[in-house]
Image: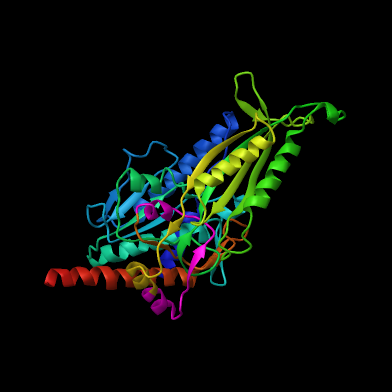
Amino acid sequence: MDLTKIGFLTKELIKYKTARPQDLVCNEKSLIERDYFIKEINDCMNYIQKSLHPSLIIERAKEHVEDISCPIMIAKFQDNNEPDLLIIGHIDVVAAEESQFHPFEKEGKIYGRGAKDMKSGVAAMIEIMNYYAEKGAKPNIAIAVVSDEESGGLRGANLIVNGMGYRPKFVITPDPGEKHCIINKEKGFIWFTVTVVGRSGHPSRPWLADCAFSKAFKIWIDIDNKFNCALSEVDWKTSAVIIGIEKIFQNADGTFSSDNSRAIAGIVRLKIDIRYTENEDIEKIKLELNELVKRYGDNNKIEYDNIAPVCFTPEDNEFVKSFKHCADSIEEDNIPILPSAGASDLRYFSEKKIPCVNYGPKGGNHHAANEYVEVSSIAAFYNVITKYIDEYIINKQILSRKS
């Protein structure tokens, strides 16, 4: 393993500004931002393909990709869609200041947007494939690189599973959790938008209006009291958070625009994220939300933007136990198996009863300022994965041929 090469690849990938613009309206500035993002995300994916050994089979799934802002790439040694191991990573990141796309290394850490989440993991994936290609080995493994995990994975991992029909025996993603561990269970989520309708008016005469902000806050307080229960990562209950609130107005053609006036809000759009566990009934949650929103006005509307299932593989699964053996051995520690309040692309595989875990390099501050990854931990991740491939895939293939 060339740690210098992995560090170089990580920094090169961070330089691509792959933060997807959100809720773009059709104006000149927004279209320029979207075009810029499309170029960056595709340039990043093309860079990854060029960094891979030329002997690999590359699949870009162009017949499945309808949105050019969501490229997909799969690299593999054998021409099938049932690899013994699939490692999946994403190159899209959350928004950040310009400075975070200028990576730097200090005291054994690489800093920059996506350093931990998860361009270091993608860099290691590239080098894992190159390692076996340069050896002349052709294990039945594959890597998948997608570009919409941060926005739900419908045009990435979902297409790989439900469009392209991939059915790997085991899936790993180096997508970080709060703690360094092997994650075998992740919460599902409900992303939804509540449109709250009041009546606009002059701020000097509130008695003549019906402030949509006031109604929206009441709706949120009820949702907060009902669903925001978890107090920590391991407190396995639902959680809820507001991720956006905006005053809007309706145009003559029925579309909506931001309302930056000083008038009392007539319409407010509230975006909310609820995380739920396998102990909850998703249809019951939706019914409760629908009733709660209508409680504050019949004209209020709730729209479900994305709903994802809980991801779960039992600790005693043979693939999980084998992988934990490799992680414990390389890290010389007892790596815990823990649940995560977050979500990842693994859920699409879990829905098909495919065993999967989340395990990646150590770092900190993902989705925040000063995001970093520990360089030595990228090496550990690489070594754990190659140990698993050597012991549980290649050796088994050799024994199978001998028998």
Choose top left, top right, bottom left or bottom right for residue 289: top right
Residue 297 horizontal side relative to residue 71, left or right: right
Left or right placement of residue 295 versus residue 233 in this view: right
Left or right of 375 on screen, residue 399? left
Could you tell me residue 403's position as x and y percent?
A: 12, 72
How many marks on residues? 0
- Asked if residue 240 is positioned above or below residue 386 in the image, the reply reads above
Quadrant where the N terminus is found in the figure: bottom left
Of residues 133 and 377, the one nearer the viewer is 377
Residue 270 in sight here:
no
Determine the residue positioned at 30% across, 68% down: 389
- Residue 363 in sight: yes
Quarter of the image holding residue 331? bottom left
Judge by depth and name the residue closer to the eye, 126 or 166. 166
Residue at the far bottom in the pictured view: 332
Magenta region: which residues? 325-352
Magenta stretch containing residue 328, yes or no?
yes
Please tell me which residue is depicted at 61% across the width and 45% down the height of the picture: 272
